Image: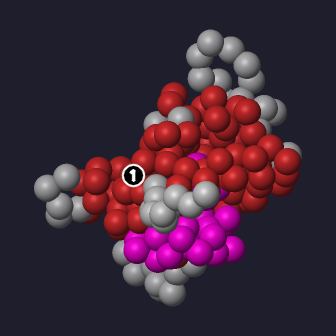
Amino acid sequence: AVCDLVAEVRRAQRIAPSLTAMCEECDVELFLVLPRMIWLRFLVEPERHAELLRSLLPHRFPKGDEVKMDSEVEAFLKKYSATQKVLTSQSKAECPDQDAWEILVKRVVAGSSDSTCATEAEQCVEDLMRSLEPWSIELQRHCPEDWNQCSAILVQCLTRANEKPKSSAFRV
């Protein structure tokens, strides 16, 4: 799940270039975006990311072989599915699922919107983002030590790829 998350954040950097600067500078905004990205990835692929969220929010994901979640997480997942359906139905792109993903990533990275929510799709996205914020905060605050370790690993993975090997002459 962590490797997939890192790969998706890198993909998101191409969609929302400001995320690249956040990662390079370890900007404080990055630590608001990371929990949103974790939730967004979970919403897209719950089976793949449930274990990561279970480790951070065990009260929301009872142990078991199958993916189990409490009713509030299930309702959040349904809200995402409804938003995804609206976005893909209104997309004119060749790959509507990809188009929907890009819209959500841009919004997750931006953090807020100046939009007046003119269309049904914009209203759905804004509603989903309003619902996402409490989940994001819970992820960070339920067990801050665990969250700090998780975010440190993610940041390390995201910034290590950008490091260039130091080339200096060996001296004795």
What stretch of residues is rendered in magenta? 16-39
Q: Is residue 18 left or right of residue 150?
A: left
Instruction: Give above or below for 119 relative to 94.
Output: below
Q: Nearer the viewer, residue 81 or 65?
A: 65
Q: Is residue 142 visible?
A: yes
Residue plotted at (85% across, 51% down): 144
Instruction: Give above or below for 46 relative to 130.
Output: above
Q: Position of residue 117 (x, y in %)?
A: 45, 79
Circle 1 Cα neighbour tier, 10 Å, few/some/many (<14 / 14–19 / ≥20): many
> Secondary structure of the magenta portion, mostly?
helix
Q: Position of residue 28 (x, y in %)?
A: 69, 74
Q: Nearer the viewer, residue 145 or 168?
A: 168
Q: Which residue position is annotated with label 1?
A: 84
Q: Is residue 152 magenta?
A: no
Residue plotted at (49% across, 48% down): 6
Q: Position of residue 20 (x, y in %)?
A: 46, 70
Residue plotted at (80% across, 44% down): 146
Specify the farthest residue to the top: 65
Instruction: Give above or below for 21 relative to 67.
Output: below
Q: Is residue 163 left or right of residue 172?
A: left
Q: Position of residue 84 (x, y in %)?
A: 39, 52
Q: Is residue 29 visible?
A: no
